[in-house]
Amino acid sequence: MNRWQRRIAIAAALALAASAVRAQGASVPTDATRDEVRRDVERVKVVGPAEVMLKDQARLALPAARMWVPHPVAGKILEAMGNRPGPRLLGLVYPLAETDDWIVVAEYEPAGYVKDDDARDWNADDLLKSLKDGTAAANKERKSRGFPEIVVTGWAEKPAYDAATHRLVWAARASHVGEQGGPTIVNYNTYALGREGFVSLNLLTDSAHLDADKVHARELLGRLEFVNGKRYADFDSKTDHVAEYGLAALVAGVAAKKLGLLALLGVAAVKFWKIGLLALVGAGAFWPRLRARFAAKKDAPLPPAP
């Protein structure tokens, strides 16, 4: 496939994905928004392997074939997808492989030191019931903002906490209300606890690709380390703030309010923005070179920018 055929294929893929995104109620960017995002991503993107600082709290060793888009540009992308990114957003991780359609949303929550005592005694069934109840209660807000209501259908992966590394992993299956027979939506949640709060790396994918995609989320979690002085082990009970909730609340309480609000629009929206961003990022480098090549030939007309 030559580059012109490739551009046609990309355009067709974008059109198909945009149709699916519209059907889900997600927003499709205007040309102006698309161009602005392209310029912003080109300006701030980090391509692995590289080290990414997450505020003054932690370092992420970004692997090869991954692209990091920091906030506030990451916030613009989520807004264009119909979401309302909060002040906790750190950035987005994209795979550069064309066959991968997932996004990891990174956030930092300065909640304080989250005690992990309750992880020894929690019951997965009780946590699931609390998550279902909390998600149902949050549907009123979703509906008022034009989002489809969400129903939690079960665990995709039961909550598991590693006390040695202070890392939590869990995933719930969810569907849009009235569409339980359709594609299952999955947020694969990973957390790393620190002295002053926690970093969450939230993988957005669908159930069909969860087993393959969660490997990447776990890899990123394993590459995240808090800096000296901010580690969980650095906690000082005499001076440090203790969070108002425990570890179970990261599954059943806090998560219930976020489930469905943070880019939980289904795989079509993820795929649309993944294809669009990588196509635009590539175009940002390719078209200036092509125009310069044409300009070197006096009689050749310049091709328009995309």
Image: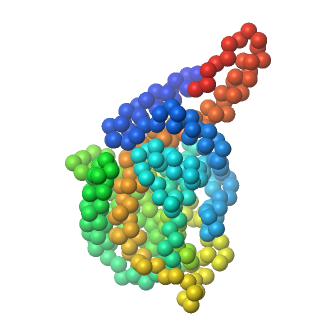
Residue at the image position 38 percent from the left and 68 percent from the top: 254
Residue at the image position 68 percent from the left and 58 percent from the top: 51
Q: Is residue 70 visible?
A: yes
In this image, 68 relative to 26: left or right?
right
Percent coordinates x, y for residue 143 in the rendering: 28, 52
Residue at the image position 74 percent from the left and 21 percent from the top: 293
Percent coordinates x, y for residue 80 in the rendering: 46, 43
In this image, 6 relative to 249: left or right?
right
Looking at the rendered image, the quarter that the N terminus falls into is top right
Taking depth in this image into account, of 82 and 7 the one nearest to the observer is 82
Percent coordinates x, y for residue 226 in the rendering: 61, 71
Q: Is residue 215 visible?
A: no
Quadrant assignment, res 247: bottom left
- Rendered view: 108 above or below 277: below
- Rendered view: 51 above or below 37: below
In this image, 220 relative to 28: left or right?
right
Looking at the rendered image, the quarter that the C terminus falls into is top right
Taking depth in this image into account, of 59 and 183 the one nearest to the observer is 59
Taking depth in this image into account, of 187 and 143 the one nearest to the observer is 143
Q: Residue furthest left?
A: 178
Percent coordinates x, y for residue 88 in the rendering: 51, 62
Q: How is the image coloured?
A: rainbow
- Rendered view: 162 above or below 300: below
Residue at the image position 52 percent from the left and 82 percent from the top: 241
